[in-house]
Amino acid sequence: MANRLLTLGRNLQRRKAREKEGLFVAEGIRTVEELLSSQVRAKGALVTSRLSETPRGKALREQLEAAGVPVEDVSEQEFESAAQTETPQGVLAIASVPEQRLADLNLGDVARILVLDAVQDPGNVGTMLRTALAFGVTATFSLPGTVDLWNAKVVRSGMGAHFRHPCLAGTWDDLDAFRREHAITMWAADVGGTPVEKLTPPSRLAVVVGNEGGGLSPRTREQVDRLVALSIEGVESLNVAVAAGILLYELRQ
Amino acid sequence: MANRLLTLGRNLQRRKAREKEGLFVAEGIRTVEELLSSQVRAKGALVTSRLSETPRGKALREQLEAAGVPVEDVSEQEFESAAQTETPQGVLAIASVPEQRLADLNLGDVARILVLDAVQDPGNVGTMLRTALAFGVTATFSLPGTVDLWNAKVVRSGMGAHFRHPCLAGTWDDLDAFRREHAITMWAADVGGTPVEKLTPPSRLAVVVGNEGGGLSPRTREQVDRLVALSIEGVESLNVAVAAGILLYELRQ
């Protein structure tokens, strides 16, 4: 039983292990605080002595214990072997990936879905989840080729969004079936598209953003109802998280 | 004379050296390509044998030589000792920081200035410069406490924006004098501000964004004409580069 959580934490660095176990890792004080204040259930936490050096860290440890979360004390070196983000601040929690499926989404007359089409930078993806929550987006759906939404770096960048915003992954076929069933129009961001400020958004809309370097995948180009753009000058493109932020703001419900 | 550029590149990792020499470092194929296609003058480049392994890298080396830029071949290890970004792709160029001052800015009847108030993440700052260029912002001005705009990581994230968009730094007094002289209104982003979509922007406007964790500095709060916000829910704040992107889009000229 010794170091059971440490072994688990190390395993969860691999996407396959996260998917098999249905677990993910939340690193850093802020992320673990957000986790504890959400409905997502923490299974355990790894801490080093460093955590108790600040009042905020000390309080977090007490909160973990008060919530009945098993806490395992490990050395700095052991901790580093399980952590994936920079400056993880001597605390990480292991928690269950919320069970969410497209079929469970509660779509109103008006709905917005953010679709990630092979977006690869964990910081960009976490930032987009945070933005999606902030603008009341119904859910984010990641297509194959996108970084795992439950990667520790994505969770860290999401700053708690993962615990309050439906974060889903699936295939193109899953998304197609869902769109057909719920009459969801699909727009995708592309530099050659129609300026978005000239358009009136449909009531149910999925907004697709593509890969940082390569843009939209062939299948998105084939299936999308409309390509939309932001009017820019002097640069080839905006950062994908900035572009998604402006589109979700402009197209908010 | 041997390895003169290597020694210089290593020195330029320090902000003080960059300021003293008036030089900066551009790392990676894309950034160096953008540099060469701009008006900014490259003083020299360090390359490793890895650069010539791809057609694009090989073409870049030829372009550097055709442009009369001194190219110094170094080992991978030497190169790493001068590079500051991840995966610098075997090429970095040393170039002159463009001589730009507030007094030289060409302000039209309508102007937008982005002001960075102790923003610290290089990726966020580079992304904001890219956005500022894309939306036709007149200049970006960084206040004390902000990461050096000519830091190699900021330059890399800017994806060429540094070479086409005035990137300035100075004191609060510099900014005050400039604002008084040119009748520039100042708005700052703050969660407690007026929703920006309810406002009509003045013709000459400076938009201030604050530190990632701490927000606006006391001096900004004191001097700003108005605090403005984006209407968000469920999160404390947006990522600063996303917030700046939406504000610059919403308030574009």
Image (cartoon, coloured by chain):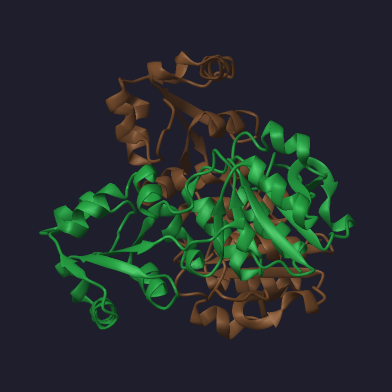
Chain colours: A brown, B green
Would residue A126 be found to the left or right of residue B155 on screen? right
* Residue at image coords 56%, 55%: B168
Q: Quadrant of residue A35?
A: top right
Kindly identify the residue that appears in the image at 52 percent across and 42 percent down: B120
Q: Nearer the viewer, residue B131 or B3?
A: B3
Q: Could you tell me if residue A225 is visible in this image?
A: no
- Residue A160: x and y, percent? 60, 40
Looking at the picture, how far across and down is residue B78, in whole percent?
A: 16, 54
Q: Position of residue B147 (x, y in %)?
A: 49, 44
Residue in the foreground of this view, choosing between B94 and B173: B173
**Screen quadrant of the C terminus of chain B:** bottom right
Answer yes or no: is residue B195 visible: yes
Residue B48 sits above or below residue A137 on the image: below
Above or below residue A17? Residue A218 is: below
In the shown orientation, is residue A127 left or right of residue A178? Answer: left
Residue at coordinates 39% horizontally, 68% vertically from top-left?
A: B31
Report whether B84 appears left or right of B196. Answer: left
Q: Nearer the viewer, residue A60 or B170?
A: B170
User: In this view, which residue lies farthest toward the left?
Assistant: B2
- Answer above or below: position of A167 versus B60: above
Count of marks placed on residues: 0
Quadrant of the rendering where the N terminus of chain B is positioned: bottom left
Residue toward you, B224 or A126: B224
